[in-house]
Each structure stands twice: as C-alpha cells, then as structure tokens.
Image: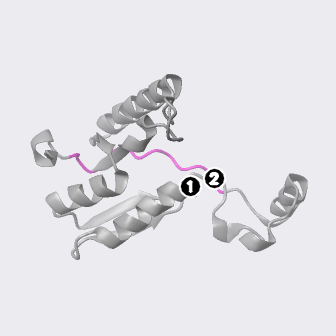
Amino acid sequence: MCLYVVDEQWFAPLIDGELTPRIGPARLRFLWQSLMELRGELLQRGSDLLVRIGKPSDVVIELADSLNARQVRVAEHAGVEESAHIQRVSQGLPSQTTFECIEGGRLLARQALPFEREALPESFSAFRRSVEQACTVPSSRCAPITLPRGLKRQEVFLP
C-alpha cells in the first residue's frame, strides 16, 4: 500500500502568535494535484494511494499495527522534523513489522560520491568537477507495468 501523510503541523503557524500557516494555499494546491496525479498513476498499475492528515509517525505506526503489516518502507528525508518522524516510526512499529528507510530522490547515491559528507567541496564547481570525474550517472528505470493491489477502503479504516 502506498501512503502519504500530510503533516498536520503544516496547517499551523511556524511562529507562535502568527496567523500564517507553514504551507500556503498555492503550495497546498500543488501538493494535492501532485498526489492526485500519483494516485492516478498507481491506479493504472493496479495499486492505490492512501492519503491521511495527521502526525506522520503516529499515522504510519497506527496503520501498520491495525493492518498487521509485515514491512514498512519510508523514503529517507534530510529535514529535521521528517528525520524525527522516521526515527519514531522505526522505534514504534509492532515487533512483527520490519522497517526499511530507502534512500531516493537523488541523482547519485550517497555511496557513489567520491568523498565523505564531511569532505564536501566548498564550491559547487569543485563538487561538479569531482563528481564528473569519478561518477557515472545511472540510467533511468522504466516505470513498472503493474504493482501489488491496493487495499480496499474497508481494510484501511481508522477511527
């Protein structure tokens, strides 16, 4: 099952006393349109997308528990709040559920870089030269034709 959790904190102000939420209407509209496009692609391949609003770590743990999930996979994120949610999920899943955090969304895998994170070149030009000499950009993969079926609505009902 593919799940996207819209963090409820995005609708609250970043700074106490402010009225402006973290996510504005234009960005929220773009996010929603992107999620609906993703759902359409998943439906064409035999799966579905479940969208929930809440605290991401709580939603994932609760859903994994209620469905007796064998495995939970999440995309790695560099953000502080996102990393904290991932950490809470990895620690809060039921004992029968395995956890995997997948690196993705980058042109090159971290292990492919010719230097450690601590030795990151100071300028982009130096970074680019180093990467161009040492790395090969992997070829793109085709989208899968089919995916495992999504769960039926009654199977994923949470109070």
SS at badge 2: loop
Colour logic: one colour
Badge 2 crowding class, 10 Å Cα cut-off, few under 14, some 14 to 19, many 20 or more, is few
The residue positioned 63% from the left and 52% from the top of the image is 139
Q: Is residue 92 left or right of residue 13?
A: left
Asked whether residue 52 is drawn in magenta, I would say no
Q: Is residue 16 left or right of residue 152?
A: right
Q: Which residue is mark 1?
A: 79
Whole-percent x, y for residue 28 in the image: 46, 29
Residue range highlighted in magenta: 138-150
In this orientation, which residue lies closer to the viewer: 86 or 38? 86
In this orientation, which residue lies closer to the viewer: 119 or 145? 119
Q: Which residue is mark 2?
A: 139
The residue positioned 84% from the left and 59% from the top of the image is 127
Badge 1 crowding class, 10 Å Cα cut-off, few under 14, some 14 to 19, many 20 or more, is few
Whole-percent x, y for residue 117 in the image: 72, 70
